[in-house]
Image: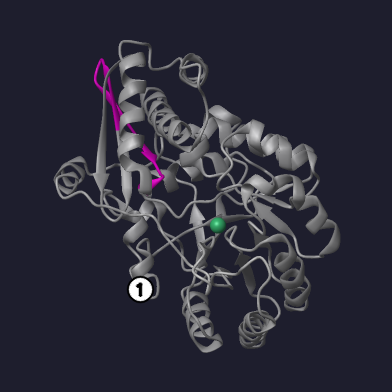
Amino acid sequence: MIIRRIETFQIAPRWLFVRVETTPEQVGWGEAIFPKRVRAVRGAIADIAANIVGSPAGAIEDLWQRVYRGGFFRRGPVLSTALAAVEQALWDIKGRQLGIPVYEFFGGRVRQHVAAYVGIGGESAAELVAGAKARQQAGYRAVKLSPTGPLHYLDDYARIASVVENLDGLRSQMGPNFGIALDFHGRVHRAMAHILLDALAPYHPLWVEEPLLPEHGDLLADLARRTPIPLAAGERLLDRWDFKTVFEQRALAIAQPDVSMTGIHELVKIARMAEAYDVTVAPHCPNGPISLAATLQAAAAVPNLVWQEYNPNLSLASRRAADPSCQNAYLKHPGVIAPTAEGNLVIPSGAGLGIEVDEAQVRAADEKGWEVLDMAWRNTDGSLAEW
Ligand SMILES: [Mg+2]
């Protein structure tokens, strides 16, 4: 199987699909992220294609090493997601060639399904409760929300009080056993993170995600020692070397690698490292259908994994609207990666990634394209805030 062609498709709402074709004819699919730098990612994938077209498609580890190391300058989200998407497609091809799902390459399946959690939005306790109740009625046992807007380095205690009020309302309405994960999204600075973690601990969050920006990984241990809330991070970490730092800090309870940033095998490798630090894995995946399918292939083979992110509403603007088919779009059999009535995602057992991409639909959608521009949140004094 020789790699013959690598194409990219820019698909609404914000997805970038990669199609790898071989001689003799076999096709595999992958998905990149980083929509705000989509031209750069497409360019990086074209650079990868220039280097590996004509190579054996089955030598995945060797191709990964060549691409990772061969350009001299390595890593960074653009190069990492480009490589991850191509790697997913190569596993898809290898699985299809041998007629087995990708998880078989990583020791086989250790679970039948993984519990899915979903995001909710809302400004007030009433809005958050309505979102969480709707998810609960759909079968989910946990939700995730970002509890704060922009926060300055030192901010008003009124903002803390409003976050606490929302969480108090949510916990009292949802009961003690419903999972409420909180995502600080790297928008909270260290002094405020300490205050918030103390204030929110009585409401028993499932975890707090990105309590600080990823570049402050060395400061996480300090937070972890002072709060009972499990800390999570990893969606902006790229590979084993990034995770090594946070694991050695003994700060994380939950690692959240994103398969469209790490690739499938790298996610499994990170999960194996996590196991040695008694850290669980909850893969990040607010992405499209190929990324979700690739995540599930890795999740199938990882024993130390508890929750899987699932996002029924990919467009942030429509997050409050019900659109359960969204993360399953562009598939011939969308039910393969749709959640069950109990809020679980069943591991697809078909060959490769276990999905059949509707190529005609993908090619048609690519002609429309999309644009996602940078966020620019401001503090009340006009200075730029983290978002
Ligand atoms: Mg997050």
Pointer 1 residue Cβ closer than 8 Å to ligand 1: no
The answer to if 25 sits in the magenta stretch is yes
Disc 1, SS: loop
- Occupied quadrant, residue 206: bottom right
Q: Looking at the figure, which quarter contains the N terminus?
A: top left
157 up-or-down from 17: above or below? below
Q: Position of residue 194 (x, y in %)?
A: 76, 66
Residue at position x 25%, y 15% from top?
24
| Residue 131 against residue 219 in the figure, above or below | below
Q: Where's residue 71, x and y in %? A: 46, 17
Q: Which residues are magenta?
A: 19-35
Neighbour tally class for label 1: few under 14, some 14-19, many 20 plus, Cα within 10 Å? few
- For image coordinates 26% across by 15% down, the residue present is 23
Q: How is the image coloured?
A: one colour
Front-lying residue, 174 or 249: 249
| Left or right for 189, reference 289 | right
Q: Is residue 104 left or right of residue 326?
A: right
Residue in the image at 55% along x and 45% along y: 236
Q: Mainly helix, strand or loop, the magenta region?
A: strand
Residue on which the image places disc 1? 322
Tell me, yes or no, whether the highlighted magenta stretch contains residue 137. no
Identity, as a three-letter code, of the amino acid under mark 1: Ala
> Against 75, is 295 above or below?
below
Instruction: Write down which quadrant ligand 1 falls in.
Output: bottom right
Residue 38: horizontal and vertical position, in percent? 33, 42
How far from the left and from the top, in percent, is residue 234?
A: 61, 47
Closer-to-camera residue (218/2): 218
Q: At x 71% / y 80%, what residue is drawn?
A: 176
Q: Is residue 143 left or right of residue 375?
A: right
